[in-house]
């Protein structure tokens, strides 16, 4: 227990080796020995806010944990048997094939969800299981059933360490050992059943029918209605109720003078006698039970399945892209080979390029939405950062960037009436896909270390607006002053628009009929003439150097995104 949840959670993180060791003093011992560097991979940790893939079923989540956290020397059949046994023990048989649930998908109950999270950690049979306020968000009955489950595990020989806030009495009586903190300082540590007697001895009596857990918090907060049998000495100039600070100091001092404190201190001195733990370097490492390719296979399958079961991120986007392609096709339907055709071609190519850039904004939440899930699974040794990164990139590129771009091109290209050749169509398709990849990569590079999608969207929108200005359509680039002109080399739409213009205008002839002195004459110009006027090199290298630039930018942005993901703070 603690009056400050943050301090309590911090204390639990220190015990579980999930807090950055920098700046910490002291030592956490396990059976008298220092924690192994990979202790967080050997122990179980159930976080307060459930982190589990909501689109998958209970069984699928447990199988995922078993596949990645159990060594490959264990056959898959044995892993599945272990999962089925765990489902039975956790009482999840009736909902084993039900989805856990998301904001859009109705799932299992809160208690079943909590037991699923516990099961994800129990897969490896951890000798120690940490739980951060496991009753959060649960009703009294469900919370009691979860704690009864933990009590049965403790009786079977597993060490259960948990933080909790204001438990009911039926939960409190399940505890074997109790630790009370106030302001980060210890006021009681010992058998839970002896706590009431201890407080009675120092002057606080729990009223009949009062919940001991509520009584302890009342005493610590100075709001207790308990009868004070003893008072501090008058020469100290204060009483028990004079101030909260005085009560905290009094409780801390009383515990230091108690037999329980002396017994605990002597036991610790015996353990550390002759050992200099203070000079040991505190290190945190993560070990893996499976290979890179094994992890990649399972994480990629889960990522694709999650996308397919999230209609708002897969089918909805494809539907929107088809609708947009039809609208664009109708507006620019059957472009002519005259001056209006030049204007329409430039307009539609610019629109398509910019649309590919702004549609990539949806990838901003690729890493943000699952930040807590990724951090928890990475720290617990499920998979490497590179495995998670590649899986997310491939799933997003193939399903949300490539497929919509192909569908859009097949619908809009022929409706608009662009150059009717297979070669031109595939160059067009390749160009807009590459623009989409580059814009998505930049979005990921910006958002990888962000925690709020709205903030990432602001940065990306500003970036794309400036890029759009330097695309070559809205402003004549040669006329821009030198100290700003270099920004055109950072413009994704500029490279994409230039490639599309070269692909479309080369080989075309545009003719207009003009009436001069009553005589109609036909004035023609070539697409190459238009490209020269725009200052665009339409040679083979002039075309493909745009694709090369987009490819290099994509690679650079992906490296930045990976490094951000690799080095973001993953501990409290």
Image: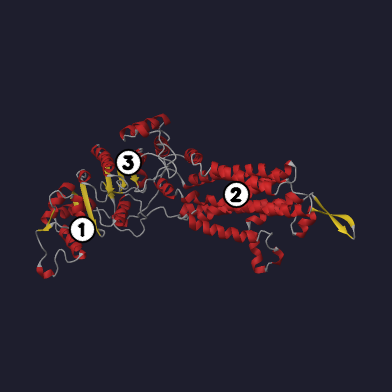
Q: CA–CA distance between discs 3 and 1?
A: 30 Å
Q: Is residue 259 visible?
A: no
Residue 5 at what x, y percent from top left?
Answer: 29, 55
Residue 163 at what x, y percent from top left?
Answer: 28, 50
Residue nearest the viewer, comparing 54 with 83: 54
Residue density around tag 1, few if under 14, some if 14–19, many if 20 or more, within 10 Å: many
Q: CA–CA distance between discs 2 and 3?
A: 42 Å
- Residue at the spot of label 2: 437
- Residue at the spot of label 3: 111
**Disc 3 versus disc 1: nearer the observer:** 3
Residue nearest the viewer, comparing 2 with 73: 2
Which residue lies at the image location 9% right of the left edge and 58% below the top edge? 229
Which residue lies at the image location 64% right of the left edge and 67% below the top edge? 484
Tell which residue pokes out farthest to the front in this image: 518
Residue density around tag 3, few if under 14, some if 14–19, many if 20 or more, within 10 Å: many
Q: Is residue 460 above or below residue 99?
A: below
Residue 432 at what x, y percent from top left?
Answer: 65, 48
Residue density around tag 2, few if under 14, some if 14–19, many if 20 or more, within 10 Å: many
């Amino acid at each position: 227990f603690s009056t400050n949840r943050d301090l309590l959670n911090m204390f639990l993180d220190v015990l579980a080796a999930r807090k950055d060791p920098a700046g910490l003093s002291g030592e956490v011992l396990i059976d008298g020995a220092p924690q192994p560097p990979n202790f967080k991979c050997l122990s179980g940790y159930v976080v307060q806010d459930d982190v589990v893939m909501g689109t998958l079923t209970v069984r699928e989540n447990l199988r995922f944990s078993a596949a990645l956290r159990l060594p490959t020397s264990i056959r898959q059949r044995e892993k599945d048997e272990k999962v089925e046994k765990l489902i039975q023990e956790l009482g999840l048989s009736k909902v084993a094939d039900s989805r856990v649930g998301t904001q859009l998908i109705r799932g299992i109950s809160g208690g079943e969800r909590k037991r699923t999270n516990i099961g994800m950690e129990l897969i490896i049979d951890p000798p120690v299981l940490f739980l951060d306020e496991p009753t959060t968000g649960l009703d009294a009955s469900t919370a009691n059933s979860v704690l009864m489950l933990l009590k049965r595990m403790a009786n079977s020989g597993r060490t259960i360490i948990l933080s909790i806030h204001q438990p009911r009495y039926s939960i409190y009586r399940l505890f074997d050992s109790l630790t009370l903190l106030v302001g980060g300082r210890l006021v009681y540590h010992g058998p839970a059943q002896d706590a009431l007697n201890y407080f009675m001895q120092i002057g606080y009596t729990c009223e009949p029918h009062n919940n001991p857990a509520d009584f302890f918090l009342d005493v610590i907060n100075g709001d207790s209605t308990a009868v004070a049998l003893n008072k501090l000495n008058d020469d100290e100039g204060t009483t028990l109720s004079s101030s909260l600070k005085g009560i905290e100091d009094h409780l801390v001092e009383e515990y230091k003078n108690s037999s329980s404190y002396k017994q605990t201190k002597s036991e610790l001195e015996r353990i550390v006698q002759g050992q200099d733990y203070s000079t040991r370097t505190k290190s945190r490492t993560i070990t893996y039970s499976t290979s890179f390719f094994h992890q990649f296979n399972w994480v990629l399958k889960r990522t694709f399945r999650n996308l397919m079961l999230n209609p708002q991120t897969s089918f909805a986007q494809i539907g929107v892209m088809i609708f947009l392609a039809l609208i664009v096709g109708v507006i620019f339907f059957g472009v002519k080979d005259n001056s209006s055709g030049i204007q329409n071609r430039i307009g539609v190519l610019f629109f398509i390029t910019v649309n590919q850039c702004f549609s990539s904004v949806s990838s901003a939440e690729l890493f943000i939405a699952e930040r807590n899930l990724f951090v928890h699974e990475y720290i617990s040794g499920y998979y490497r950062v590179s495995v998670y990164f590649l899986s997310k990139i491939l799933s997003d590129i193939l399903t949300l960037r490539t497929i919509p771009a192909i569908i859009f091109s097949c619908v809009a290209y022929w409706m608009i009436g662009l150059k009717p050749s297979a070669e031109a169509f595939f160059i067009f398709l390749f160009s807009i896909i590459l623009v989409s990849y580059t814009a998505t990569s930049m979005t990921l590079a910006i958002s990888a270390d962000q925690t709020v999608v709205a903030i990432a969207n602001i940065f990306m929108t500003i970036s794309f607006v400036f890029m759009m200005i330097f695309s070559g359509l809205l402003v004549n680039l040669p006329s821009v002053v030198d100290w700003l002109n270099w920004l055109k080399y950072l413009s994704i739409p500029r490279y994409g628009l230039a490639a599309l213009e070269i692909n479309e205008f080369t080989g075309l002839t545009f003719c207009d009929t003009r009436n001069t002195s009553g005589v109609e004459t036909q004035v023609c110009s070539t697409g190459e003439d238009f490209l020269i006027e725009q200052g665009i090199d339409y040679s083979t290298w002039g075309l493909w150097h745009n694709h090369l630039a987009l490819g290099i930018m994509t690679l650079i942005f992906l490296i930045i995104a990976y490094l951000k993901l690799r080095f973001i703070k993953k501990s409290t």
